[in-house]
Amino acid sequence: MAHQSFFNWSGGKDSALALFHSLGDPNYEIKKLLTNVNAAFDRISMHGVRVSLLEKQSEQLGIPLQKILLPEEPSMEEYEKMMEVNLKLLIEEKYSHAFFGDIFLEDLRKYREQKLEKIGLNAVFPIWKRDTTELIKEFLGLGFKTIIVCVKSDLLDESFSGRVIDESFLNDLPKGVDPCGENGEFHSFVFDGPIFKEPIKFTVGEKIYKEYKAPDKEKESMGFWFCDLLPEFSD
């Protein structure tokens, strides 16, 4: 019998490729998407994508969405408390496995596994330790389409925000920037691919620069260029 599972969905390319592989695994049944949302702006945390587009993804994937509403800049204590409350509700609904699109950040994986194990959930990482160059080639080869919605300004300039990932984009990446952005260099929004019933329609809006408090003591702040995506609704 397949394990009832939920997918920690960011809306981006790593999530989409990991979900693609997860849906093909007979040992698991992905029955829900779980996404952190910035409640102050009604957007996906970190990615800055409007919740209306996140809901469109859920609709086209045919998988129900559960949102975790977070304050604008939650403390780690606030974040962990809200996550635990929501995860315990999923356990009550008989969910046993949590899926992630992480690739090679060891500390992050260890953190996730420890927090989940503490409350009785198992973590699964479908694309863990795979070569990121091969991953992005597979992603594009499968017919996925994704647009960059956020870039870290000290690594990529404004022009990268709002670009669709293709061979040209990959060739233009500066040396040292991971092709999957696994070190936080950029984030994306997937709008088409083999797991979607129909492409998600949107128009590209304005670009906005924002700064946030840096997590380490070496820098006071971190800058990001966000590209707003505006949903298109059919009549």
Image (tube, grey):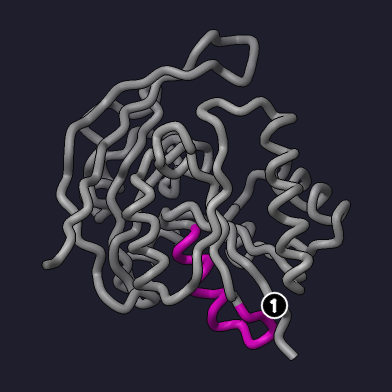
The amino acid marked with disc number 1 is Gln
Residue 155 position by quadrant: top left
Say whether residue 19 is magenta.
Answer: yes
Q: Is residue 216 above or below residue 115?
A: above
Please state the horizontal and vertical placement of residue 194, each as a whole percent of the image. Answer: 35, 77
Classify 200 as above or below 132. below
| In the image: residue 220, left or right of residue 159 | right
Q: Is residue 225 above or below residue 67?
A: above
Question: In the rendered structure, which segment of residues is drawn in magenta?
Answer: 15-29
Q: Residue at x 49, y 44 (%)?
A: 37
Furthest-bottom residue in this view: 1
The percent position of residue 140, horizontal first and vertical second, equals 32, 65
- In this picture, residue 85 sits left or right of residue 203: right
**Residue 62 at x, y percent in the picture:** 43, 76
Say which element carries label 1.
Answer: strand
Magenta stretch, main secondary structure class: helix
Occupied quadrant, residue 121: bottom right
Q: Which residue matches tag 1?
A: 4
Q: Quadrant of the C terminus?
A: bottom left
Rendered view: 44 above or below 144: above
Q: Which residue is at 50% across, 63% downward?
A: 65
Q: Is residue 88 left or right of residue 99?
A: right
